[in-house]
Amino acid sequence: MTVTLLGAADTLDRQSGRRGDRAYLSGLFRHREARVILIENLDPLVRAASPEHAALIWFPASEILERCEANSLLFLGISKGDGVPHFALRLALDQREAFSRIYPLEAATDFRTLASAGTLTAADLALVGLSRSLYAWHDSARHCGFCGRPTGTIDGGWKRHCEPCAKDTFPRIDPVVIMLVTDGERCVLAHEPRYAPGMFSTIAGYLEPGEDIAHAVARETYEELGVTVTNVAFYNSQPWPFPHSLMIGCVAYCAPTLLTIDRTELVEARWFSRADAAHMLARTHPEGLWVPGPQAIAYHLIQHFVAWT
Ligand SMILES: [Zn+2]
């Protein structure tokens, strides 16, 4: 079983230029091969005896039309190869019960558990993550931020509109810098209060208005570890649908020095050698310390550090 990085939903053509065309979207939904995933709260309906054996269910859109109101429908895109339209639909509570009578094996499964279990394909995981981020945004944008009146969903779920103000609201993304701080030989990994016992990870923090990525990395590193970084390099990025972050992975260099830890944010932070970090990746560390799994960008930042020669 391979766990992959929870990555970008890039397997579909999102057709972003055509989302505003209602007739076009409704034609796509009636396409004989159109497929739909069902989301309950923010978790997908899967066919599973356990998260380790879960498979995402793509329902034929024709079956969904018979049983659901389509007012929470999201248009995800069309297959780049064969043009098959893909949608997500959020089940209302009473609809869930109707579905459970017809499909008794299905259960909504916690998305975080699914992402760590590694049983969904990378493409399916990314599409569920995308749907989850959009639904979380819809939950927080039901009312207009200017006049307070209810907003309506348009553009296949990619925009909300306030009629009286004639204003549109767009899906929210929260950028987060996540950085591997290194002196060249060792890296800093930290334990936050919310982590499971023994788990250490790279430090992270939200970007603030008026910052660029390097500035945010330097500020957060100084706040949390009391060290000054001299060089920041972009490594990779990752959509992180908890609920709608974008993790911007960086490597930040600093001189070997003692850490002054911000105890409000971190329980502990330490310098770790490459050998230590390798053991934490493999979950063979003698102190029982470990790092997040390969679904998270932190794992790949640490692996990148371990692989340097
Ligand atoms: Zn308004």
Image (cartoon, rainbow, N blue to C red):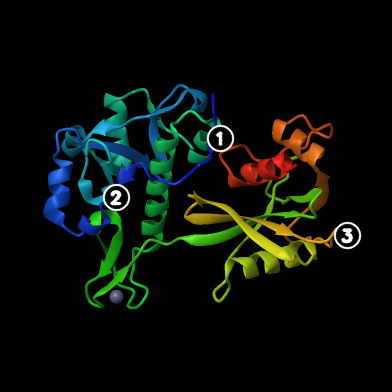
Q: Residue at x 52, y 25 (%)?
A: 52
Q: Is residue 62 left or right of residue 162?
A: left
- Asked whether, in this view, residue 154 is left or right of residue 39, the answer is left
Give the farthest residue toward the front.
Answer: 309
Of 224 and 90, nearer the camera is: 224
Check disc 2 and report the residue beneath it.
Answer: 14
The crowd level at tag 1 (other Cα within 10 Å; few <14, some 14-19, many 20+) is: many
Q: Quadrant of the N terminus?
A: top right
Quick check: 215 left or right of 286?
left
| Vertical position of residue 46 compared to residue 263: above or below | above
Where the C terminus falls, by quadrant? top right
Question: In whole angstroms, how far apart are the C-alphas of marks 2 and 3?
Answer: 48 Å
Amino acid, disc 1: Ser
Give the Cα separation between the discs numbered 2 and 1: 26 Å
Which residue matches tag 1?
A: 116
Residue hosting label 3: 258
Q: In which quarter of the image is ligand 1?
A: bottom left
